[in-house]
Amino acid sequence: MIFRSDNRTPDQIRPVNIVPDFISTAEGSALIEVGNTRVICTASIEETVPSFLKGAGKGWITAEYSMLPRSTLTRTPREASRGRQSGRTHEIQRLIGRALRAVIDLKQLGERTITLDCDVIQADGGTRTASITGAFVALGLAMSKLVEAGTLSAAPIRDYIAAISVGIVEGEVLLDLAYEEDSQAEVDMNFVMTGGRRIVEIQATAEQHPFDETQLKKMMDFAASGIEALIARQRSILKNLPLRQ
């Protein structure tokens, strides 16, 4: 069995802490800590929609993602100073947006936009998966504000959603990779799944050696177990959120 520096078993997730209402000025917010990875997620509501949705009678969920310069071991220049976002940033924020849209009834949301901002303040692997998990909490809290104000009768959320990484390191399947493990993984995967254990997205790359169906099944089982634990944490925070049936 491979030794993990934090003494976790192969199928064990890192310690998770979610602090709701972390930013008082946002309609919904959460600080999510997964091991040493920390992401601030905020949800902002605007009573408008993008031009391609004008008059369509439904809303929109979108996301923006960034990493602070010293979220990493060495300083990463701000993308604003470069004049453009990286391909990685575009990929991750599009992933966050479509993951959350997968569990939202956009027609019931009405013609309004909710923007999820995910700002990584410390990175130790799994920043995109932590962003999805934390952004859902921020989104749920923002929906609660709309329900409390009487704008919506219930939150137009079909199901909970969370994400986690899994990979193969030195031939062994490991759940929730820290950076040290991710950087040497032979296979790197990210799973996005709902509370009903339905798959929204799988990102998978065999960076060194191809993997077989048996390994894939084990990775899926590990991921489902990890996401179940993450969603239990989300439910404990959003337990009073009235969902649309």
Image (spheres, grey):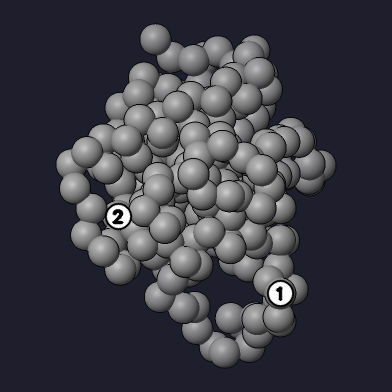
Would residue 140 be visible to someone looking at this image?
A: no
Please tell me which residue lies in front, 222 or 86.
222
Q: Position of residue 22 (x, y in %)?
A: 78, 41
Q: Is residue 134 above or below residue 152?
A: below
Q: Amino acid at mark 1?
A: Leu
Quadrant of the image occupied by residue 71: bottom right
Q: Position of residue 194 (x, y in %)?
A: 39, 28
At a point 60% along the width and 33% down the height, the residue shown is 137
Q: Is residue 87 left or right of residue 4?
A: left
Count numbered badges in the picture: 2
At a point 48% along the width and 24% down the height, the residue shown is 228
Quadrant of the image occupied by residue 133: top right
Label 1 neighbour load within 10 Å: few <14, some 14-19, many 20+: few
Would residue 221 be visible to someone looking at this image?
A: yes
Q: Amino acid at mark 2?
A: Ala
Say whether disc 2 or disc 1 marks the residue closer to the N-terminus: 1
At a point 62% along the width and 25% down the height, the residue shown is 233
Say the numbered circle drawn on residue 237: none
Residue furthest toward the bottom?
Answer: 82
Say the numbered circle drawn on residue 204: 2
Where is mark 1, residue-wise? 73
Q: Position of residue 217 (x, y in %)?
A: 26, 35
Spatial distance from mark 2 to mark 1, Cα to Cα? Answer: 26 Å
Please tell me which residue lies in front, 94 or 61.
94
- Quarter of the image with the C terminus is top left
At a point 43% along the width and 14% down the height, the residue shown is 244
Q: Position of residue 1 (x, y in %)?
A: 49, 44
Q: Is residue 39 above or below residue 163?
A: below
Q: Is residue 137 left or right of residue 159?
A: right
Q: Is residue 202 above or below residue 143?
A: below
Q: Is residue 196 left or right of residue 93?
A: left
